[in-house]
Image (cartoon, rainbow, N blue to C red):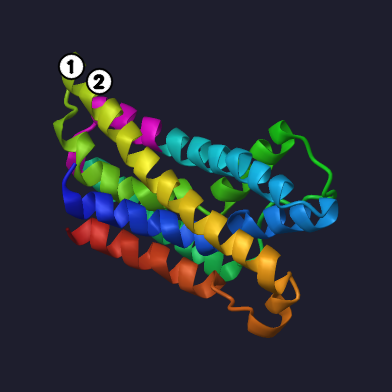
Amino acid sequence: MDLWSLAIMAGLGAYHGLNPAMGWLFAVGLGLQERSRGALLRALGPIALGHELAIGVVAVLVVGLGVFTDPGPLRMGAAAALVAFGIFRFARPRAHPRWAKMKVTKRELTWWSFLMSSAHGAGLMVAPVLVGSSVRKAGHDHENVLASLGEAAAVLLVHVGAMLAAMAFVAVLVYEHFGVSILRKAWLNTDHLWAGAFVVAGTVTLFS
């Protein structure tokens, strides 16, 4: 994995961490509910774990398909999936799991994060990076497949590490100094930006 790919994954992770829909807003809500910064910080681990599982499913699928499929068709498939999901997000920007309660266990919070990250296509967005790097060398060789899986795991750790750092920074900042009321004054809707990013990523993947 080259430095450019790692930088892309870290940047995507930071973007996910800054997005309120990915979990920091939920963590702030839990902290305010219990009047404890510790409750906020404890929520970040399960949220990050759920996100990691969501993109991990896609990573295993991509590397697994790389064993039986040439990179060309796999790249085309990833591009088609990205563009299709981007169009879907344009049409249904609010399509994501609903959660009816704020009092949750760590397991429930991990599951919520997994569903939310999957619904927002977090795993799909990392697919082009995996297709363009580790899958190229997977082939049918057992050792290369294991190397690709190890490389994918390292990439996902970079991604989730960047997400966790960004999410923790914003969550603590909002909790300590602003409160959730700031969202009424400074809310930036990124739904269409995120949907457009899928279409662009799919197009770049197809012609790269």
Q: Answer yes or no: do the residues labelled 2 and 1 have beta carbons within 8 Å?
A: yes
Say what amino acid the circle numbered 1 marks. Answer: Glu
Name the side, left or right, on which 137 lies relative to 52: left
Q: Decide whether the magenta segment is chiefly helix, strand or loop.
A: helix
Q: Where is residue 86 in the image (x, y as percent from the top left)?
A: 46, 63
- Residue in view at x 43 percent, y 58 percent: 14
Count of labels shown?
A: 2
Q: Does the magenta stretch include residue 205?
A: no
The relative height of residue 174 versus residue 22 in the rendered view (above or below) is below
Residue 104 found in image quarter:
top right
Q: Is mark 1 on a helix, strand or loop?
A: helix
Q: Position of residue 13 (x, y in %)?
A: 42, 54
- Residue 20 visible, this angle: no
- Residue in view at x 56 percent, y 70 percent: 191
The relative height of residue 149 versus residue 182 in the rendered view (above or below) is above
Q: Where is residue 199 in the image (x, y as percent from the top left)?
A: 38, 66
Name the side, left or right, on which 86 lies relative to 106: left
Q: Quadrant of the N terminus?
A: top left
Which one is nearer the viewer's eye here, 123 or 64? 123
Q: In which quarter of the image is the C terminus?
A: bottom left
Residue 153 found in image quarter:
top left
Q: Distance between the residues labelled 2 and 1?
A: 5 Å
User: Disc 2 designates what residue?
Assistant: 146
Say what amino acid the circle numbered 2 marks. Answer: Leu
- Residue in view at x 45 percent, y 41 percent: 55
The relative height of residue 87 versus residue 57 in the rendered view (above or below) is below
Q: What stretch is highlighted in magenta?
A: 59-72
The relative height of residue 64 versus residue 85 in the rendered view (above or below) is above
Q: Is residue 63 magenta?
A: yes
Q: Is mark 2 on a helix, strand or loop?
A: helix
Q: Position of residue 48 (x, y in %)?
A: 54, 43
User: Disc 1 designates what residue?
Assistant: 143
